[in-house]
Amino acid sequence: MQFTQTLTSLELMVPVFSAGALFSGLILFMYIYHRSHHILYLSIVFMVLSSFVFVFSESMIMVMGNLMGEKDIGIQFHRLEQVGGAFFLFALPFFLAHFLQLRPSWNRANLYIAYAGLVMAVSITIIAFTIPDLFISINNPQWDWKTHQGSFARGKQGVIYVFRDAMLALVILYSFTSTIADLIKSKNIRYALPVLIGIAIAIFGAVDDSLYVHTRRFIFFPNTPFSRFTTGVTIMNLFIMASMVRKFIDQSLLVEKTTKKLSENEKKLENLIEANQSIVFLMNTDGTILDVNAAFRKTLGYSKDELVGKNIFEFLSRQNENDKYQKIFFLEQLEKLDAKTSRVEFTIAFNQKYSMEPKEFMVHLQRIDYGDKIEILGNATLIMENSLIKYIKTERMKLHISNYLWNAEQAANRLTINLNKHLPVDSILGIKTSLREMIINAMEHGNMHISFDQKTQAQMDGSYFQLIQKKQKEVQGEKQYVNIEYVLRENLVGYRITDHGDGFDAKTYLKNAVLTKLNEEGVAHGRGIMMTISVFDVVRYNDKGNSVTLIKKFSTENGVGNG
């Protein structure tokens, strides 16, 4: 067959080179998306893939249909080419939705346009393979197939093809105006201007090709036949890819710079923490230790491996078998750490590794919220003896404390702090433990009306902490507080602890039979009164049973005790 217009080498080579360039870009952005997992680069993959199918099919039309005379195969590639072009209806607005820095509502609209375009592209694909005459006929050739060699393997265009072209024109023009709006709003010349230039070139290519269909002449290089739209689409993708590669490199450099800066700051912070003379530790909200500094290890004698990964409650002092409250006190403080209360402070005792003797510390806990996780930064300072204690002869004080178990610990610490000059350490420890037990009794059994059986059951099933929290919320008015009177003289120390409960039959309770029964049953609580009797010289309840007076006399044999 003789053609009035034969295929030129330029007309053949343009789609071949264009397909090669797009394939290289497709591989590149698949790698970039794999590295970054950023949806912006995935949108580039979709767009370049659609362009590659379009341009590669154009190349195959030229090779299989025109050069080799395989008209039937060429027509199939013509159909595939135009199906690939239909997916621009999705790929281009999807890219805009993740690239442009417009209002959120505008970007949401771009997504809706993209999804609508995807529905149209899938529908066109189905029609192209089920009712081909509505899109690209595989039996009827294009009208100029006998005159122009480049049209030899192209099928006749149907009504869906015209509709696709109209929608594609609207999407490309919309993309052009949206990019201009973004350029004006964000002044993002570095990235948006190449995209705008690329879209403009694609539009010019489409217009030039459309004019040729009607006038048989091109505006650009009028005597040189080649697909302007194929070239325009390729150049548009190359401009967009170049802009996005630049963006990826800029972001990578920024991340590298930020990471380096963070690493430097982290190293400085680590050095500062290690050099800190006070104990510094980091833990989860459940008490699992994540890191500790040298002071923690040096003060308590544990190695880092012995501390990290363990629960901090394992290192709290257990002075005797009845001392089960330190963990509860610590948990109370952790409960306070929320979005409103980001910092708490309290005293606590840790055990030393080898001697197992307790050391008291002032502990500060601070909540650190990372968004997806929360950690607790702790700082602990060893409590040293106040040099003025030895000058104190007498002291009197009244405390009005609320029903938090930690307040019992705080009060017991404060009310025994000035006993060092009068008593040895083991006696002071006994007084402190007994005071704490009696204050807790006043809170639990007096103010909060927790019965002996309730507490026993709660400790057995592990719900004791929850029971305390529930009861704390129920009490109102004066029942929220325990009153403590304290007096220190040269020959004795005295305490009176009063709650607002109904009291109990103290005389009966103090009988040996009751105390013996508790020991025989192995109950984990209820021994506080027995311990108190063994520590204090006087233990006297009022008739109602809601107030107890405790007196410890100082023996002249002790001299100044431990002071």
Image (cartoon, grey):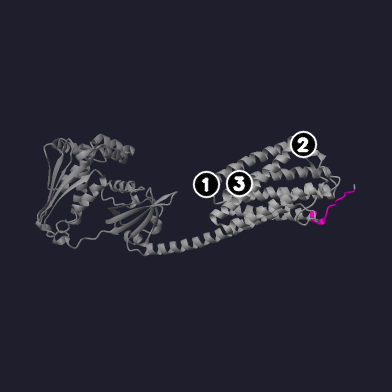
> Which residue is labeled 3 in the image?
94
Q: Earlier in the sequence, mark 1 or mark 3?
A: 3
Q: Is residue 97 left or right of residue 225?
A: left
For disc 2, the neighbor class at 10 Å (few under 14, some 14 to 19, many from 20) is: many
Give the magenta-colored segment's residue range.
2-11
Q: Is residue 6 shown in magenta?
A: yes
Q: Quadrant of the C terminus?
A: bottom left
Q: Is residue 339 shown in magenta?
A: no
Closer to us: 154 or 283: 154
Disc 1/disc 3 C-alpha distance (Å): 14 Å
Whole-percent x, y for residue 61 in the image: 79, 48
Q: Is residue 459 visible?
A: no
The amino acid pointed to by label 2 is Asp
Whole-percent x, y for residue 204 in the image: 70, 52
The amino acid pointed to by label 1 is Pro
The amino acid pointed to by label 3 is Phe
Mark 1: secondary structure: helix
Residue 533 sits in quarter? top left
Q: Is residue 232 left or right of residue 342?
A: right
Q: Earlier in the sequence, mark 2 or mark 1?
A: 1
> Which residue is labeled 1 in the image?
104
* Image position of 30 with respect to 117: above or below: below
